Amino acid sequence: MEKEKPFLIGITGASGSIYAVRLISIFAQRGFNLDVVLTEHGEQVFSYELGFKFSLDNLIKYSEKKYKIIPDSSKIRVFDNRDLFAPPASGTANYQGMIIIPCSMGTLSAVASGRADTLINRSADVILKEEKKLVVVARETPLSAIHLENMLKLKNAGATILPAMPAFYNKPSSMEDLVDFIIAKILNILSIEHKLQPPWGDIR
């Protein structure tokens, strides 16, 4: 896995901002370069759920306090979702992959229909056309037929649909265990080694 090529993380207005923070902290711990884009509603939900406004400084402080990880700010860039001139809007940016975490049904619908009117939507469109890994951490329940049809569209286009559905066979004892189960699934898809979730054979 090349650490110089960045990963792109999109954060939307679905519930589950903690998933994004945890993934960023893990990537930072591994020394990967990261680009981050938030939707307007993503920022609002982030502040509501985590109790602080999204900024690189606040993210670093939170990661240090909660996970004992201090991200290298020089390896993380944050882009405005309205900026369609930003690097993620072009296939020449050469990302290793993109994770939309959490992904609202609105964003999922936009990406599935090819509506590239925001940086997150356009970036996902680029990732798909360049045949890079796009992991969509969908967060909604119950799911309507429209949601399912849009997920199928994205799956057929090459995306990985990874709903935020933590399991319980690993006998989680905290919310952090539930979060890490999903993060481990993402790392598995991206072929990144980790120790967050042991293989099933090691759990029994």
Image: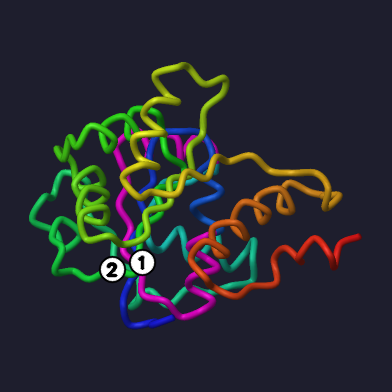
Residue 3 position within the rendered picture, expressed as x and y whole percent measured from the top left:
39, 82
Residue 25 lies left or right of residue 113; in this view the side is right
Residue 46 position within the rendered picture, expressed as x and y whole percent measured from the top left:
46, 41
Q: Residue at x 76, y 66 (%)?
A: 198
Residue 190 position within the rendered picture, expressed as x and y whole percent measured from the top left:
48, 66
Do callouts 1 and 2 mark residues in contact (Cβ within 8 Å)?
Answer: yes
Numbered disc 1: secondary structure: strand
Farthest residue in the right direction?
Answer: 204
* Residue 95, disc: 2
Q: Earlier in the sequence, mark 1 or mark 2?
A: 1
| Quadrant in which residue 74 is drawn | bottom left
Hey, what amino acid is under mark 1?
Phe
Residue linked to disc 1: 7
In front: 114, or 184?
Answer: 114
**Magenta residues, as a range?**
23-49
Q: Any magenta on residue 124? A: no
| Above or below, 176 relative to 115 | below
Q: Residue at x 51, y 34 (%)?
A: 139
